Structures are given as structure tokens and as C-alpha cells.
Amino acid sequence: MQASNPATVRKVFLIATEESGDRLGAALMKVLRQRLGDTVRFSGVGGRQMTSEGIAPLFPIEELSIMGFAAVVKQLPKILQLIRRTADAVLDEAPDMLVIIDSPDFTHRVAGRVRARNPNIPIVDYVSPSVWAWRPGRARAMRSYVDHVLALLPFEPEEYRKLEGPPCSYVGHPLTEQLASLRPNAEEQKRRETQPPVLLVLPGSRRGEIRHHLALFGAALGQLGERLKFELVLPTIPHLETMVREGVASWPIVPRIAVGETEKRAAFRIARAALAKSGTVTLELALSGIPMVTAYRVGAAEAFILRRAIRVSSVILANLVIGSEIIPEFLQENCTPEKLAQALGDVLADSPERLRQLVAFGTLDAKMSTGNQPPSVRAADIVLATMSQRSG
């Protein structure tokens, strides 16, 4: 079976199983179509945005919306079946390029199966696994089934070089293309400084994350509300809205629910501070100029594993890019309502803690710059170059 096709048609198979990956995949597809016109054909796994760009997904990505070691174990037979099904679909399609996007526990297993059975299919990994944080041996192992890694964080290419991984290029984070929608205009900035302040609460974008954090966040905000007045806004995504509304109904202070990306960004532009579950959202908040407190809780089994595997002093993306532990993080047993409430009070006030975060956030644009090329364009350039090298 050969991966190459007539020059009139280029087949690109993309796999994204989370909403963030779906956005990346859709942007990449758009640029590839601009470059290749009617000669490109897409297939694979994706969500609503990739579907709107022309993919008929093999299965709904919500089937993989799980979090935590115990949840994965329970769903393992289903996950393995989807891995086999996806790998078989790639092999049947024999595309000119396979692009795996994030979700490494799923996508890398698919890529490994594909490479073992058809080494002629080039494979690009869009979004690096966190090899710099834990399980660094993955970087070297990836050389056997990944031809190029497209990194979203500026420090990642050097980490791959040190760890002897596959070629890795910083293409830029998609958030750097969205700064206008993240940052307030003059009127919105005035609202940030007006009382009562708007406080964002971001408990996660997966069901498991919400289960671990929602009650904890509600208790912390209840304690904070005993001494401070604030307006509470909780952004979420459509398929989690019902779960979130049910979960916050008993909170001492019931938040306004902002559903979807447009409402979320509008809330970001007027927010003074945030309580967030650790993750990509910390970088989004930092680029928006919103001081924050972060928290992370997982199940006992996963916590046991992570404590022995983590090799960085901070798990906050914004801290890692800034190069300093400027944002407070509360993990596992250290993550209590009392500690979260105290830290939130500090970042809501005109305090040294708040000022330190704001000054650090001012360095991010330079650290994450990609020049004049948007990340999706840089990513497409490398995908096309890799495709050309492998077919040549």
C-alpha cells in the first residue's frame, strides 16, 4: 500500500478528539485548502469546526471526553476499539499526510499502529505532548512514528533537542491570533476597574474536571463572598451547560453562565480576576491580562502517579512561558477552599501579588511572537514541506 496519490489529489487525514484540537485542525484545513485548492481532500476525526471545513468524522469526539485514571480504566475497551477503528480508517485511506492533533494517549497510539503497518504515510504531530513535564522518554520514542512536531510553546523545540526527539518547530499558539477578542477596549477596561468586580470561575472543559473542581470552587467562592462583593461569571461549552448549571445551583453565590466562545471572550474582557483549573486557560487569562489563582485536583490513583512523574516545578503553562512561578497554584491536598479564597482576595485587590502578575503578563507578547506569520500558516508550511519530503 502506497501513501502517494496523483498530483491532482492530496489526501490529508486529521485526528482531533478535543474542542481545542478541533479549532486547530479547522484553522489548518482552511490554510491547506487555500494553498492546494480543489486538489486537497480531508478525512478523519474532528468536532464541529473541522466538520464545517469538510471532514465527516468517524465518531463524535464527545465519546472521548473523559478525565482521570479511573475513568480511563473503566472506558479502556471502548478507547482501544476506537484506536483500532481509527488506525484502520487511516490505513484504508492511505493518505498523503496524517496529522495528529493533541490528545496523545489516543492519537499517538493510532500513529504508532499506522507507522508499523504502512511506514510510507508521513505523520505530523500538532501540539507537543508535555514531555518537558513528565515521561520525557516519550520524546525519543516518538522518533519512530512522528516526522515533525508542531509546538505551541516557545520553549518546546529546545526540550525536544535535549531529549533527542523528532524535529520540532515552534509554530505559535493560536491564542496569539486572537488577542483582539481577548483584550478589553477602553470601556471594557473601565469595567475591570469598577466595583463590584467581575470574577471568572473556570473549572475545566471536561466532565471529569468539572466533577473534581466544581464543589471545591463553589465552597471557596462562598467563603470569599462572606467578606467581598463581586459578580461571578462561569464560561462553559454547550454540551456541558446542563451539568454546570445543575452543579452551581446550590452554590452560595450562583454565577452567570456564559455559553460558547463569544460569551466567554466578552466575559474575559471585563473580568478583574479568575479562579481557574490548571490548563491552557491559564495562558488565555494571562494574555488577556487577568490575574488569577489556579487549582488542580485529580483522583487518588492519578495523583499517586503524577507525584512520581512530574519533572517541573510548576504545571501552569503561563508560568512556564514566563519563566517564573508568578501565578499561585494549589494542588491536591493543598487545594482547599480556605487557601483559594485567601489567594483570590489578594488578586482582586490592588495588591503586590496582583501587580506582579500584571507586569509578568506584559512580557508574553514578545516571548510568544511568531513574526508576521499566523500559527496556522506556519503549521501548514511544515505539513506541506513534510508531505513533499516524504513523497519525494
Image (cartoon, rainbow, N blue to C red):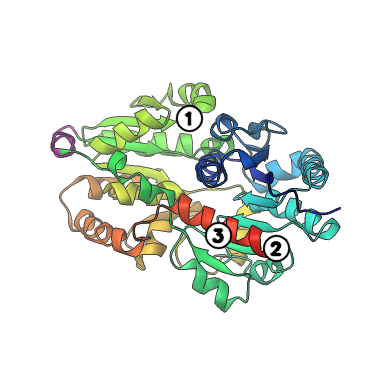
Along the polypeptide, which appears first: circle 3 or circle 1? 1
Reading the image, the residue beneath label 1 is: 237
Q: Where residue 203 sits: x, y (%)?
A: 45, 39
Identify the residue at horizontal 60%, vertical 60% (top origin).
Answer: 306
Q: Where residue 214 sits: x, y (%)?
A: 47, 35
Look at label 3 and name its amino acid.
Answer: Ile
Q: Would residue 347 appear left or right of 62 to someone viewing this image?
A: left
Of badges 3 and 1, the one in the foreground is: 3
Q: Where residue 310 sits: x, y (%)?
A: 56, 65
Along the polypeptide, which appears first: circle 2 or circle 3? 3
Circle 2 sits in a helix, a strand or a loop, which is it?
helix
Along the polypeptide, which appears first: circle 1 or circle 2? 1
Reading the image, the residue beneath label 3 is: 382
How packed mark 3 is, by other alpha carbons closer than 10 Å (few <14, some 14-19, many 20 or more), is some
Reading the image, the residue beneath label 2 is: 390
Secondary structure mostly seen in the magenta stretch = helix
Along the viewing direction, whichever of 188 and 365 lies nearer the viewer = 365
Along the viewing direction, whichever of 208 and 391 lies nearer the viewer = 391
Relative to 282, residue 311 above or below: below
Asked whether the viewer can see residue 235, the reply is yes
Give the Cα distance between marks 2 and 3: 12 Å
Q: Where residue 102 sits: x, y (%)?
A: 59, 50
Give the Cα distance between marks 3 and 1: 31 Å
Q: Which mark is residue 149?
A: none
Circle 1 sits in a helix, a strand or a loop, which is it?
loop
Identify the residue at horizontal 50%, vertical 74% (top origin).
Answer: 158
**Magenta highlight range:** 186-196
Quadrant of the rendering where the C terminus is positioned:
bottom right
| Residue 13 magenta-highlighted | no
Relative to 247, residue 11 above or below: below
Give the Cα distance between marks 1 and 2: 39 Å
